[in-house]
Structure formats: C-alpha cells, structure tokens
Amino acid sequence: MCVYYPVSSVEENIWGFGITVFLLVWIVFVPIAITARLERIIKLLEEKKK
C-alpha cells in the first residue's frame, strides 16, 4: 500500500529556491569555466605552431 505524505509549502519553497540557485550558478559559472579552458587550449596550440 502506498501512502502519500503531502509536502508542506515551506519545503516546496526551499526546494524551489535551491533549484533556482543551482540553475543560476550553472548558467553563470559553467560557461566561464568552459571559456577559460578553451582559452588555455588555444594558447597551447598557438605556442606549438611557433
């Protein structure tokens, strides 16, 4: 038998806030990290060409 426990609105708000913060951090910092890594790779490739 499956018993359903309703989630309180406070817990829903905390989960929603946590997910929102995670998505904002992901959207802001992941492109910055990828760009920095690509710049390093490009510099290394340019040095090998010389």
Image: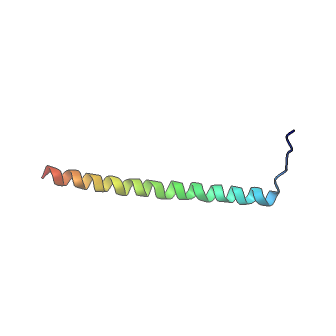
- Residue found 35% across the figure and 55% down from its top: 37
Expressed as whole percent of the image width and height from the top left, the position of residue 2 reads 85, 40
| Way the structure is coloured | rainbow
How many circles with numbers are drawn on the protein?
Answer: 0
Q: Is residue 39 above or below residue 3?
A: below
Q: Is residue 5 left or right of residue 28?
A: right
- Residue found 64% across the figure and 55% down from its top: 19
Q: Is residue 5 left or right of residue 44?
A: right
Q: Is residue 10 above or below residue 1?
A: below
> In the rendered image, which quarter contains the N terminus?
top right
In this view, the residue in front, 12 or 2, is 2
Expressed as whole percent of the image width and height from the top left, the position of residue 27 reads 52, 54
Q: Residue furthest front?
A: 1
Q: Residue furthest left?
A: 50
- Residue found 17% across the figure and 55% down from its top: 47
Q: Residue furthest top?
A: 1
Which quadrant of the structure image shows residue 24?
bottom right
Q: Is residue 25 left or right of residue 9?
A: left
- Residue found 42% across the figure and 57% down from its top: 32
